[in-house]
Each structure stands twice: as structure tokens, then as C-alpha cells.
Image (cartoon, coloured by chain):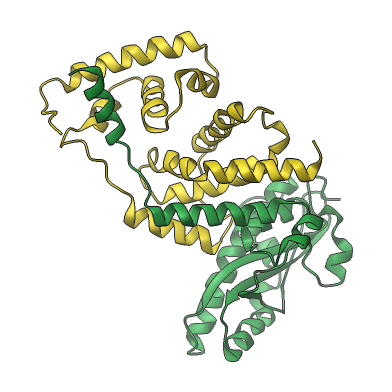
Chain colours: A yellow, B green
């Protein structure tokens, strides 16, 4: 692929997934403002690794989130870059992130009782909208493993949440 | 609790960024794209929005920029039409771990400056604080023998913070605060992984 075509494709794919990437980080950081820095880092890494982007768009999305996961795992604060947009984003996330609405059920607390990998599988499937196949691709695991862990995690959550009101 | 109820509960438990934050994130993505595209492409597109978000990449790829440096032109970076880069660069020098003298030009970028603010900010380059600055940063951080890329990154990080801080302080002292800070950019030569 010519450089211009590659750049056009990368720009298109990144822009199509930017909102989801931001949400991905907002949901996984204790300080929501960190999400702005993590998104900024991820955007740069995605561009620098553009030539590794899978040729199939369907595979590109989990690949991009795989990059996001690695950026998250290597999170480091600093002032490596300063951008007016990044500063604005940091403020906006800190003040306006929508709180979850789960009828008073502390699902986050229940989720934290699961093994880390199972938590992430639940988040990827139910929060970020990945199929179990894409979740497996993103995590670099066999699909069957993801399916079985997902099923088990759901059953554990169901057990922990029994007794809470569920009326909507 | 049936499957549908559990699915619904899980879906509604996800924190979501606000629409305004999403809009800003997309602007950030576009700004990053502008900064990361090849220069020839970027110059054809439109006036660029690059602040310092592109500067890290420039910093790491500035090995071939000596001519641009000698001409006093920050390479591969231009600014948005609504902002301006301070004309007088702050000169930052240090000796890298390969024994090479590295010379950098650091700039702040702003929006809607008054003439008085512009004068104040241009004068920052004359501050003796910057004499020996790069070597001081490396010494204070214990990076005098670190890989050249780590040295570049450390100087960049510290310069971004210090230059922005001193710019704000200068504006306050001159009674010209606030001003809208748009970004920070730095170009160094020699640069890149070989640091030659």
C-alpha cells in the first residue's frame, strides 16, 4: 500500500475508533483525566506502528485496542507532550464523564472480585462491544478459552448480584 | 437474575465520556494525524494544527535536520492559523552520552497574543537561566550517560514544563497574564537514535 493510502486508512480507522478508545481508557483509569494522556499516547503509537496494522478492517479494531491495552499497562505520567486539545480533554473528562446507572448495584465492586483476566473479558465484551472472537484476538488467547472464562465470569457475577433489586 | 437482566446491568454500568469530550478527542486524533503524516502530505492539506503533540516525534527523528536548524526553521512543524509560534527560540544545549554537542531550539505556541505579550515571550530567550540548561537537566536527573533518546526525552519533558512555567511567570510579572497557551515544540540537532 502506498504511503498516502496507508496514511488515509490509518487516519480513517483511528478517527472511527477514537470515541471508543477514549471510553476504553475512561473505564480503566482511577483518575479519569489520565484517559486523556493515555489516548494521546495511543494515537501516537498507532501512527508509529501503522505498517503493522492488519489489512482487514475487522481485524484492525481489536489490534488497535490491543495497542491501547499495552499503553495502559505501560502507563506513565508526564509532560511529554502538551497540546491544547489534550489539556481540554483532560478537563472535560474529569468534570463530565457520565456516571454509570446500575440501579444502585455496585457492579464495579463485584467485578473487582473476579480474576483480572476475567474482569477484562467482561469489560471488553459488555462495555467495549467486542465479540468473544475479537476479544480473544485482542487478548491473544484461544477463542474457546475466552468463551469459557466469559461464561464462568458471568455466572460468578450473577451469583454476587443475586438479591439486589433489578427493576428498571 | 436472567441473562437479559445481567446483560443490561453490565451495559449500563459502563462509564462513558461526555459528547463534548468525545468531540475534543476526535480533534486530538485529527491533530495527531496531521502531525504524523509525511511532511509533503501535511503541507498540501491545510495549515497545521500541530502543537507539541508532534514535537516528540520530531525530536526523535531530527537526525537529518541540521540544515533546517542552521536556518533557524523548526523542521516539519507549522502551526495552526489561529495560533503563533514565538519567533525567538530558546536555545538549549547539552553534550550527549556519545560526546556530541546537541543544540535545540525550543518554542512556545500561543493564541491571540497582544503585541506586549509577544514582546515579553520573545524576551524569554535572553534569560540566562537557559545557559547550560540541557546539561543541568541531565545532571540533575542522573542521565549523563543514558542512551541518547532517553536524554532527548528528558530534556524535552523538562524544557516543556520549565519554558511554559517561565512564560507564565514572565507574563504575570509584566501584568500581561493570562494568555492562551497552545503548545510547545522543540527541534534538536543532531537527533535520533544514533545521536551522531
Residue B148 point in image, percent of width and height? 75, 48
For the residue pair B53 and B146, the one nearer the viewer reads as B53
Residue in the picture at 72% in, 55% down: B59
Q: In which quarter of the image is the C terminus of chain A?
A: top left
> Could you tell me residue A62's position as x and y percent?
55, 28
Quadrant in the picture for residue B188: bottom right
Q: Nearer the viewer, residue B189 or A100?
A: A100
Q: Residue at the location (39% across, 53% down)?
A: B19
Residue B140 visible, this angle: no
Residue at position x 50%, y 34% in the image: A73
User: Does residue A69 appear to the left or right of A96 in the view shown?
Assistant: right
Side of B81 where B102 appears, left or right = right
- Is any part of residue B165 visible from this angle? yes
Q: Residue furthest right?
A: B67
- Number of numbered discs overlaid on the protein picture: 0
Compared with A12, B107 (above or below) is below
- Residue A117 falls left or right of residue A15: left
Residue situated in front as seen by the camera: A66 or B19: B19
Q: In which quarter of the image is residue B90?
A: bottom right
Which quadrant: the N terminus of chain A?
Answer: top right
Q: Which residue is drawn at 48% across and 61% down?
A: A87
Pinpoint residue A120: horizontal percent, then vertical percent. Answer: 40, 26
Amino acid at each position: 500500500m502506498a504511503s498516502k493510502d496507508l496514511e488515509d486508512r490509518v487516519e480513517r480507522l483511528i478517527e472511527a475508533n477514537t470515541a471508543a478508545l477514549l471510553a476504553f481508557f475512561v473505564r480503566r483509569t482511577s483518575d479519569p483525566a489520565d484517559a486523556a494522556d493515555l489516548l494521546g499516547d495511543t494515537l501516537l503509537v498507532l501512527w508509529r506502528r501503522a505498517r503493522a496494522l492488519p489489512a482487514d478492517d475487522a481485524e484492525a479494531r481489536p489490534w488497535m485496542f490491543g495497542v491501547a491495552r499495552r499503553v495502559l499497562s505501560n502507563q506513565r505520567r508526564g509532560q511529554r507532550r502538551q497540546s491544547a486539545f489534550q489539556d481540554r480533554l483532560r478537563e472535560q473528562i474529569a468534570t463530565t464523564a457520565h456516571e454509570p446507572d446500575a440501579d444502585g448495584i455496585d457492579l464495579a465492586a463485584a467485578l473487582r472480585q473476579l480474576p483480572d483476566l476475567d474482569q477484562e473479558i467482561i469489560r471488553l465484551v459488555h462495555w467495549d462491544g467486542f465479540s468473544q472472537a475479537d476479544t480473544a484476538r485482542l487478548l491473544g488467547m484461544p477463542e474457546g478459552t475466552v468463551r469459557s472464562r466469559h461464561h464462568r465470569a458471568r455466572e460468578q457475577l450473577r451469583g454476587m448480584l443475586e438479591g439486589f433489586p433489578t427493576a428498571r | 437474575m436472567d441473562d437479559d437482566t445481567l446483560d443490561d446491568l453490565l451495559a449500563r454500568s459502563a462509564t462513558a465520556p461526555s459528547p463534548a469530550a468525545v468531540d475534543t478527542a476526535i480533534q486530538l486524533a485529527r491533530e495527531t494525524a496531521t502531525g504524523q503524516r509525511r511532511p509533503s502530505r501535511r503541507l498540501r492539506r491545510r495549515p497545521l494544527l500541530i502543537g507539541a503533540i508532534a514535537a516528540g516525534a520530531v525530536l526523535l527523528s531530527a537526525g537529518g535536520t541540521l540544515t533546517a536548524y542552521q536556518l533557524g526553521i523548526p523542521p516539519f512543524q507549522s502551526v495552526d492559523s489561529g495560533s503563533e509560534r514565538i519567533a525567538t527560540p530558546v536555545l538549549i544545549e547539552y553534550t550527549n552520552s556519545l560526546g556530541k554537542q546537541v543544540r535545540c531550539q525550543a518554542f512556545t505556541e500561543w493564541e491571540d497574543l497582544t503585541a506586549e505579550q509577544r514582546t515579553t515571550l520573545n524576551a524569554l530567550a535572553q534569560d540566562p537561566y537557559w545557559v547550560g540548561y540541557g546539561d543541568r537537566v541531565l545532571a540533575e536527573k542522573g542521565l549523563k550517560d543514558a542512551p541518547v533518546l532517553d536524554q532527548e526525552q528528558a530534556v524535552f519533558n523538562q524544557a516543556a514544563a520549565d519554558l511554559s512555567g517561565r512564560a507564565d511567570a514572565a507574563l504575570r510579572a509584566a501584568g500581561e497574564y493570562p494568555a492562551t497557551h497552545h503548545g510547545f515544540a522543540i527541534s534538536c540537532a543532531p537527533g535520533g537514535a544514533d545521536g551522531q
